[in-house]
Amino acid sequence: MVEYSVAQGIRYTREHEWVRVESGLAVVGITDYAAKQLGDVTYVELPPLGKRVARMGEMCVVESVKAAADVYAPLAGEVTGVNTALEDSPQLINSDPYGSGWLVKLADIDQAGLTELMDAGEYRSFIAEV
Amino acid sequence: MPQSTPLYDWHLAREGRLVDFAGWSLPVNYGAGIIAEHLACRASAALFDVSHMGRFLARGPGALNLLRAALTNDAALLAPGQSQYTLLSDDQGQPLDDAYLYQLGPEEYLLVVNAANRQADWARLRGFHGPGAELVDQSAETAMLALQGPASQDILAGLLAGPLPPPERGRCAPGSWRGRALLITRSGYTGEPLSFELVVPADLAVDLADALLAAGASAGLVPAGLGARDTLRLEAGLPLYGHELRPDRPLLSLPLARRAVFLGLERGGFAGRAALEAQAAELAADQAGQARLVPRSIYALTALERAMIREGSPVMADGREVGALTSGTTVPAWRFAGDAPGPEHFARAIGLAYLDRGLGVGQEVEVLYRGKPVRAMIVRRFTRRVGNFLRAVEY
C-alpha cells in the first residue's frame, strides 16, 4: 500500500491542490497524493506574475513522465510569486510537496472561498475513498 | 498476469514502482525517482534489470547463414568478441525489430531482441532455419543486467575475477563470478562511454545485483528503472522500437539503421534486401523533394525555451506541418565544472521526430504542444563525450 502524507493546518481541494494562507497571501501547491499519482514531475509551466485567476480556474500545468495535469487555483486572486526553483528541480514537487515544492503565491485573495475547502481530516477521508 | 524477471522481489525490496511493460512486471523507478536515477547514471553509474529482453543463441556450422539471411546487417563482418546493431526487416523494407548481435565464438552468436517482439522474432528466425544451425531461446534460463556510467568499469573490474572485454564499444568476452560463467559485453542503451551488460544464469541474478550495488555504493551507483532508461536513451539519441522504428515506415528512415543494413554483393539475398536497396538508392540520389520510398527521416530536436514536448506533438517549419515527435520529454542534465559534472543540474526539453527529409541541422522549427507553439531547433546530437562522461550539448 502506498502511503500519502497529508499536512495539518492547510486546506485542500477535490482536485488535489492545497492552499496555506499566511498574512493575506495564499501559497498553493499540489498534494502528495497528486504528486504520487503523476509520478516523477519533469516540468512545470508556471503562470506569469500579475495574472488574475478565478476560483478553480486554470493556474499552471504540472508535467510528469506520464501525463500533463492542470492545476487549479483554490482561491481567486492575483499571482504575485512563482517557485522558480521548480524550473531546474521540478522533482521538489515529489520530494517535498507541502514545502519547497510549492507552486504559486496569490495575493488579493477571496478568503471566503477557504470555508469551501477541506481540512486535513476531510481530505484524508476523501483520498481514502478515491 | 505479466511475467516477472528473477529480480522481481529485488525490485520490490528497493521501492521499485512496478508496471506492466511489454508483458513484464518491471520498475519505472525506485525510491530515488527517475531524475535522480538519470543523473546518477551520467555522473556515476546505474544498474538496470534488462532480463525482459529476448536472448536467442544461434550456433553450429549453419548459424552464420541463418543470421545472414534473417538480419539486415551482415554477421560475417563480425569476429568472435565483437557485436553489431542489426534489424529484422519485412519484405517491404519495414522494420520488424531492432537487435544486437554478439559473436561469442567461431560458430556461436547471441541475438538480443526487444521484449515486445520476442515471440514474433523467434518465430521468424525459426523460419530461416537451415541445416547445421541450432537456435536456443535462452531468455528464461538467463537474466540480464546493465551496468552503465563512468564508474561502471571500476565497479565491475573490482568485482569480477579476470579481465573485462577490450576497451572498445561493442566488445564482448566470457567472464566468471563465484565460479559461474557469465557473458560481459560493452554495450547498453544509455550512450555512456563506459557501459556494460551482463548475461548471467537466472539463479545468479539476485546475488550479482546485490554484489554490484554493494561494490558501487561508495561510487554512487543506484538501481534505475524503465523511466530513466527511456530518458537516457532519448538523450543519447537512440531509437526505441514502436516510436522511431515502426513496422509501417521505411526502415531506412532511421539514420542509425542506415549503418545497420549491409548491401554488399558478395553477401547474397536476405529478408527485405530488394526493398532496402530501393530505399538506399533513393537516399543516395538525395532528391528529398521527389522522395517516394523514404519521404521522411528521424531528426533530433531541442526546445529553445523552457517547455514540454511529447510524442505526437506536430512539428511546423515555415508555417507548414512537416511531421511529428516520435519521442519527447524534459530530461535532466549536469552542469559541468571543468571536465566533470558539477553540483548543479538543469532541465531541457528534447525529442526525436519523424519529419520530411531535407530539413537541415540548425534549422528552427515549432513544436505544437497542447495547442501552444514551442520554439525548437534541429540538432545533430544532444550530448557529446567528455572523457568518460557524456555531457549535454547546450543550444
Image (cartoon, rainbow, N blue to C red):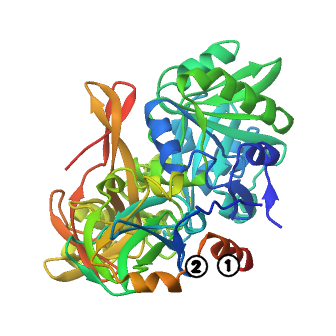
Q: Position of residue B260 (x, y in %)?
A: 46, 50
Seen in the image, is B65 located left or right of residue B257? right
Instruction: Residue at 29% x, 63% y: name it.
Output: A82
Image-quadrant location for residue A107: bottom left
Q: Position of residue B384 (x, y in %)?
A: 30, 38
Image-quadrant location for residue B363: bottom left
Instruction: Residue at 15% x, 65% y: name it.
Output: B364
Q: Are marks 2 and 1 in contact (CB under 8 Å)?
A: yes
Q: Is residue B254 above or below residue B266?
A: below
- Number of residues whose C-alpha sits closer than 10 Å to that of mark 1, classed few (under 14), some (14–19) or many (20 or more): some
Callout 1: helix, strand or loop?
helix
Q: Is residue B351 above or below residue B43?
A: below
Q: Is residue B243 above or below residue B314?
A: above
Q: Name the foreground residue: A67 vs B181.
A: A67
Asked if residue B211 shows in the view, the reply is yes
Q: Which residue is mark 2?
A: A118
Q: Amino acid at mark 2?
A: Met
Asked if residue B322 shows in the view, the reply is no
Q: Which residue is mark 1?
A: A126
Q: Earlier in the sequence, mark 2 or mark 1?
A: 2
Picture disc at residue B320: none
Q: Amino acid at mark 1?
A: Phe
In the rendered view of the protein, which quadrant contains the N terminus of chain B?
Answer: bottom right
Seen in the image, is B355 located left or right of residue A97? left
C-alpha gap between disc 2 and disc 1:
9 Å
Q: Chain of mark 1?
A: A
Q: Position of residue B244 (x, y in %)?
A: 45, 64
Instruction: Residue at 38% x, 58% y: name it.
Output: B330
Q: Are marks 2 and 1 on the same chain?
A: yes
Callout 2: helix, strand or loop?
loop
Q: Chain of mark 2?
A: A
